[in-house]
Image (cartoon, helix red, strand yellow):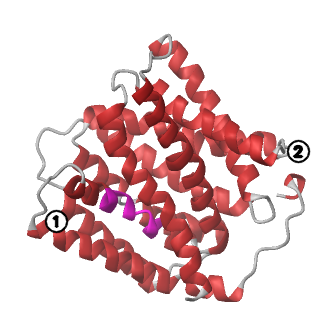
Amino acid sequence: MTTGTRWALVTAVAPIAWGSTYYVTHRFLPADQPLWGAALRALPAGLLLLAVRRERPRGDWWWRALVLGTLNMGAFFALVYVAAQLLPTSTAATIMAVSPAAMIALAWLALAEKPRVRAVAGALVGLVGVVLMLFSGIGAVSPAGVAASAAAMLMSALGHVLTKKWTATADVLSVTSWQLVAGGLVLTAAALVVEGAPPALTPTGVAAFGYVSVVATAIAFSAWFTGLRHLDAGAVGLIGLLNPVTGVVLGLVVAGEPLTARQALGLVLVLVGVLLGQRAGRRTVDRTRPPAYKGPDHG
């Protein structure tokens, strides 16, 4: 197994875990307080990682953590919930599937990662695969929902590229904890203003939030940012397409939903797109090594 393949497998933990949150959230968590749902997902995860690393941000990392936490978690989670309320899941997921192409373009501008033909082809093939898996036709579409979904996609793509740019010498777990705490605090403030008191949770709800916070957030974002450290941004973005794949597979295995021939073809195309992206990003893994950790002040 090559080094690039190992880092790709580590990165894949993130979208697979994120894909599982659809089922857990729909089945076990309250749907009427989405901002609190996002805050209770992000803030405990950040505090857990902060307790593990026991390192506070210094210097530029105070404002960087706030910027990245808002882009990657705070505003992103809130916009995704707005989009989920206003758009069919298929439409929102199709818009989010443009994220690999956005990451390729932003990495070119911000990181001088020149787009490669395989990566661009992988993004296009993956997008077609997501459309085949999830898109069920255009009905009445909310312009506000489209705007929220597109904004979430662009903000997360920018946040991921900036994370790669700013964290070359910073400890991954520390940076992840700072972002999650910052994003969680932003969400908590918004939830208090918009939704009032936090929801009352049953033991099942507490367990579900524990899974979403620890596995699908703390562990998942740590894996994702580790991938950004070692792989091209475009390659990591394409691995993110495993998110809707996981949702479809869980629907088939756990919820007993049928798998159509069109969805099966979509699954194959998404996997082909992901593999194309990893082949395109292999050069970065083989020819570069991240510098030694020098502490947060040197990020």
Magenta-span inclusion, residue 238: yes
Q: Which secondary structure, mark 2?
A: loop
> Magenta part of the protein: which range?
237-246
| Residue pictured at 16% horizontal, 65% vertical | 263
Magenta-span inclusion, residue 120: no
Q: Is residue 46 left or right of residue 241?
A: right
**Mark 2 surroundings: few (<14), some (14-19) or many (≥20) residues within 10 A:** few
Residue type for callout 1: Gln
Name the foreground residue: 84 vs 56: 56
Q: Which secondary structure, mark 1?
A: helix
Residue type for callout 2: Gly
| Residue indicated by mark 2 | 59
| Residue pictured at 24% horizontal, 52% vertical | 254
Quarter holding the N terminus is bottom right
Q: Is residue 56 left or right of residue 227?
A: right
Residue 64, quarter of picture: top right
Q: Is residue 209 visible?
A: yes
Name the foreground residue: 220 vs 205: 205
Instruction: Tell us which disc is closer to us: 2 or 1.
Output: 1
Q: Which mark is residue 251?
A: none
Q: Position of residue 89 (x, y in %)?
A: 25, 45
**Mark 1 surroundings: few (<14), some (14-19) or many (≥20) residues within 10 A:** many
First in residue order: circle 2 vs circle 1: 2
Query: Which residue is farthest top?
Result: 196
How far apart are labels 2 and 1 at the CA level?
49 Å
Q: Position of residue 233 (x, y in %)?
A: 56, 69
| Residue indicated by mark 1 | 263
Q: Position of residue 120 (x, y in %)?
A: 41, 77
